[in-house]
Amino acid sequence: MGSSSKVIFALNALLEVNQRRFHHYHSLAGKLEEGALKKLCQLYATRSTDFTAALNIWRAAYGLSAYPEKKFTVFSITWHQMKGVFNSIEKNDILEQCEIIEKDSLKLYKTAIDLSFLPSETLSDIQNQMHELERACIMLKSMKMNMSSYMMNRAVA
């Protein structure tokens, strides 16, 4: 695989993970009532869109059009809705899901950076996105710990 093929492969993988992040956060934000957690999900959905736009600029630099939006089938949408019915939407569960999404995304970003075949300008953008994902993981973990402490104190009281 040539150097440009490797770069395109890495960009496509990062674009796909950001599409998953967008759909996850957009879906969660739609289920939540107004509040800090809904705003956080909306922020992360917006940031995923921003990341996608930036990565698509690098795809264009290689002469490619924007990465195609993944379409969900009727089955996958229905299954996703059914899972929502069966799973209670508890704040701690939501934070756990979000933390897992961010950690998985972060792993892919680290792999893309570690392979180091990306041009320096592209690498710089991807590193900035990765740092934002790291901050998101830290914030989600902190929120989850605070929620757990709150629930434990409430149970004791």
Image: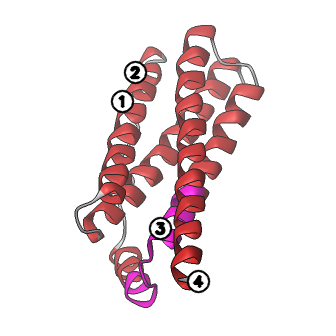
Q: Secondary structure at mark 4?
A: helix
**Which amino acid type corresponds to the residue marked 3 in the rendered image?**
Ile
Q: Residue at x 24, y 68 (%)?
A: 33
Q: Is residue 83 above or below residue 58?
A: below
Measured along the vertical axis of the image, is residue 72 above or below residue 17?
A: below
Q: Mark 1–mark 2 contact, CB under 8 Å?
A: yes
Magenta stretch, overall SS:
helix
**Where is mark 3, residue-wise?**
94
Image coordinates of residue 58 in percent, x first then y, are: 46, 20
Q: Locate residue 14: give its quadrant.
A: top right
Q: Residue at x 77, y 27 (%)?
A: 114
Residue that label 1 marks: 53
Counting from the top left corner in percent of width and height, residue 16 is at: 50, 46
Magenta residues, start to end: 82-99
Q: Residues within 10 Å of mark 1 (few under 14, many from 20)?
A: some
Pointer 2: what residue?
57
Query: Quick one: label 2 or label 3, which is nearer the N terminus?
Result: 2
Tags 2 and 3 in contact by the CB under 8 Å rule? no
Q: What residue did someone put label 4 on? A: 156
Label ID, residue 71: none
Whether residue 85 is in magenta: the answer is yes
* Residue at disc 2, secondary structure: helix
**Separation of residues labelled 1 and 2 (CA atoms):** 6 Å
Nearer the camera: disc 2 or disc 3: 3
Q: What kind of residue is marked 1?
A: Ala
